[in-house]
């Protein structure tokens, strides 16, 4: 078994192992926002966690920055499920994601002699936040402030890999959102006024960009 395949396999197992804790945290966040919430499916959390960890491991490989991106994947699992249930992205979790990214990736850039990555990440965070804030204003609230805030940590993490990652991440997020929205309308499960949570699509867009964009 090659080192890369082994890393992906181990990351998937790690995702499964921490999924009960992620599910508990998800339930706690939902309970703060919904009356009489239903317990989150443990199978769903386990699948999302293992999948997210595997994608990140495949994209990053056996490098020092991998731990930071596994942290990102874990956070995105929680945020995505909470957003689907409550249509809200917990501010404290979004802020923790950004803080964690700064704390975990800055030393990696310094130790590996790539301080430029810190600049890329900072630009990505600002660009992610500002571009989504502009869309929030243009769409007159069609994009929530929670999504705008999430643009900062996602911009930091994808920007750390290179500035070309952010537009790909946003493009994938909007394309996936549009496709799902069309499918929901065709199956009469939604109409043009139905609010579809955008957080999960932002998560998929970020992970997809890490996997699809050629490395620096």
Image (cartoon, helix red, strand yellow):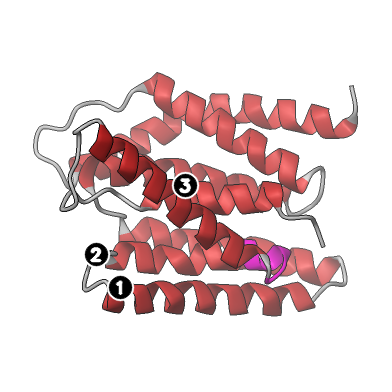
Residue in view at x 52 percent, y 32 percent: 49
User: Which residue in the structure is indicated by mark 2?
Assistant: 142
Sequence-earlier tag: 2 or 1: 1
**Could you tell me residue 30's position as x and y percent?**
24, 41
Q: Residue pushed farthest front?
A: 186
Contact (Cβ within 8 Å) of mark 2 with mark 1: yes
Q: Is residue 178 left or right of residue 155?
A: left
The CA span between labels 3 and 2 is 21 Å
Where are the magenta residues, as a range?
157-163
| Image coordinates for residue 50, horizontal then vertical, percent | 57, 29
Main secondary structure along the magenta-highlighted residues? helix
CB under 8 Å between discs 3 and 2:
no
What residue is pinned by disc 3?
76
Residue highlighted by disc 1: 136
Q: CA distance from mark 2 to mark 1?
A: 6 Å
Instruction: Give above or below for 76 relative to 142.
Output: above
| Secondary structure under the numbered disc 2 in the rendered image | loop
């Amino acid at each position: 078994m090659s080192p890369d395949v082994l890393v992906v396999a181990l990351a998937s197992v790690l995702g499964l192992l921490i999924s009960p804790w992620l599910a508990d945290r998800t339930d706690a966040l939902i309970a703060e926002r919904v009356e009489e919430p239903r317990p989150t499916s443990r199978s769903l959390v386990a699948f999302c966690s293992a999948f997210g960890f595997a994608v990140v491991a495949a994209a990053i490989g056996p490098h020092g920055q991998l731990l930071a991106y596994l942290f990102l994947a874990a956070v995105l699992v929680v945020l995505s499920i909470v957003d689907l249930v409550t249509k809200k992205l917990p501010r404290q979790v979004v802020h923790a994601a950004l803080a964690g990214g700064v704390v975990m990736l800055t030393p990696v850039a310094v130790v590996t002699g790539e301080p430029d990555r810190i600049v890329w990440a900072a630009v990505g965070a600002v660009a992610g936040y500002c571009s989504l804030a502009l869309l929030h204003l243009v769409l007159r609230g069609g994009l929530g402030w929670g999504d705008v805030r999430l643009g900062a940590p996602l911009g930091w993490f994808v920007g750390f890999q290179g500035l070309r990652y952010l537009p790909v991440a946003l493009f994938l997020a909007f394309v996936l959102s549009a496709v799902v929205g069309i499918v929901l309308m065709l199956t009469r499960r939604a109409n043009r006024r139905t609010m579809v949570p955008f957080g999960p699509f932002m998560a998929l867009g970020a992970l997809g960009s890490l996997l699809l964009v050629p490395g620096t």
